Amino acid sequence: EAGHRVVNLDLDAETAKRLGEMGVDGRQGELKDFSGGPFRIAIASEVLEHIPTDDLAPSVERVHSALEENGLFLVTVPFREDLARSTTICPHCGETHHLWGHRQSFDDQRLRSLFHDAGFRDVKIGARFFANYAQLNWGGRATFLMKHAAWSLFQRPSSSLKYVVEARK
């Protein structure tokens, strides 16, 4: 809106369809196959950790090529996630998989290399807690505050802690 062209890419065809009904250019597909551009800003919030290893670099390179000169890619991913801690066994097929389908874990160095190798010239990486604090009950708020305190005091990651990446073309 307001003179901006918004394009949404989602693996789920139904989500893309619903967005289209709301006036958004909703597309179904994978990031590595995305076509379009140039864009001023691209956002991938909690996306990269789901991409298979062989597709990760090509996906970030694809975003780089879709951005206009000086364009910005904003990304959030889980902070140093221990994938083994959330691996489970399917009771139906017996296969192991991550509870939320995460295939990647990131640290500062891996993120910096991924974005620089894709051609981004200015990469800023930070860590931030995200939670919908207003919708948490008192127990949820207490848990969130304890996780935040544990990180601040002992550098212990929590599921609320995310890397935030600002990568400029």
Image (cartoon, rainbow, N blue to C red):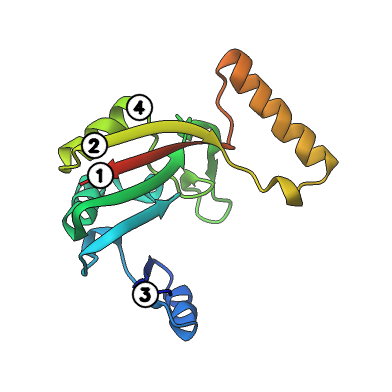
Tell me the distance, in whole angstroms, between the alpha carbons under discs 1 and 2: 5 Å
Q: Could you say which disc has been placed on residue 48 in the image?
A: none
Nearest the eye: 168 or 13: 168
At label 1, counting other C-alpha atoms closer than 10 Å, the crowd grade (few under 14, some 14-19, many 20 or more) is many
Tell me the distance, in whole angstroms, between the alpha carbons under discs 3 and 1: 22 Å
Rendering coords of residue 124 (x, y %) = 33, 34
Q: Nearer the viewer, mark 3 or mark 1?
A: 3
Query: In the figure, residue 30 lies in which quadrant?
Result: bottom left
Q: Residue furthest bottom?
A: 21
Query: In the figure, residue 65 lies in which quadrant?
Result: bottom left
Is the residue 73 above or below the residue 105 in the image?
below
Q: Could you say which disc has been placed on residue 168 in the image?
A: 1
Q: Are marks 1 and 2 in contact (CB under 8 Å)?
A: yes
Sequence-first disc among 3 and 2: 3
Residue bearing mark 3: 3
Q: Are marks 3 and 2 in contact (CB under 8 Å)?
A: no
Q: Nearer the viewer, mark 1 or mark 4?
A: 1
Q: Residue at x 45, y 29 (%)?
A: 80
Is 61 on the left-hand or right-hand side of 24?
left
Image quarter of the N terminus = bottom left
